Image (cartoon, helix red, strand yellow):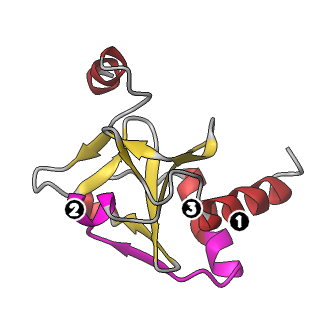
Amino acid sequence: MLIKQEALKKDFDDAIILNQYGLVAEGTSSNIFMGQNGILKTPILESGSLRGITRGRVLEIAGTLGIPVKETKIKQTEFMQSSEVFFTNSMIELMPIVEINGQRIGNGLPGIISKLLLGNYRIQAGGL
């Protein structure tokens, strides 16, 4: 909670947590994904991220849609150069991130992978 409070003090909506090795782990209450060159990437659990119910659903949906998925170690520099980024959790479902620390992600709009996954997530959840 302290990390989230610090982010809010700085007028950010949330924070991205790095592990002790500087690798991307998760958000303060969310799992995190990135899209790059048509591949969906998320930190491996060993990076310090939690399993997450919504994370699991997004990975399943990506598989059924034929989106290549890679659970891997993600360096901060690679993450910042991605074409799209989004958080997932049960409350927000899937939330695109278009800017981090004032740096635009991709073209500054939600990416095609996140739009596709969110639409399918909502269809499978009963059209919410």
Residue drawn 37% across the image and 19% down it: 8
**Residue 127 shows up from this direction:** yes
Q: Compared with residue 36, is residue 85 higher up or lower down, i.e. above or below?
A: above
Between the residue at mark 2 and the residue at mark 3, the CA separation in whole angstroms equals: 25 Å
**Magenta-highlighted residues:** 60-80
Q: Secondary structure at mark 1?
A: helix
Q: Compared with residue 98, is residue 115 higher up or lower down, i.e. above or below?
A: below
Amino acid found under the numbered disc labelled 2: Thr
Amino acid found under the numbered disc labelled 3: Gly
Look at the numbered discs 2 and 1 and tell me whether their residues touch, using CB distance below 8 Å: no
Look at mark 2 in the image and give the residue it sits on: 77
Q: Secondary structure at mark 2?
A: helix
- Residue 24, percent across and down? 27, 55
Residue 121 falls in image quadrant: bottom right
Between the residue at mark 2 and the residue at mark 1, the CA separation in whole angstroms equals: 25 Å
Nearer the observer, disc 3 or disc 1? 1
Q: Residue furthest right?
A: 127
Quadrant location, the N terminus: top left
Residue drawn 63% across the image and 73% down it: 62
- Residue 47, percent across and down? 25, 59
Residue drawn 63% across the image and 35% down it: 91
Return the mark for residue 56: 3
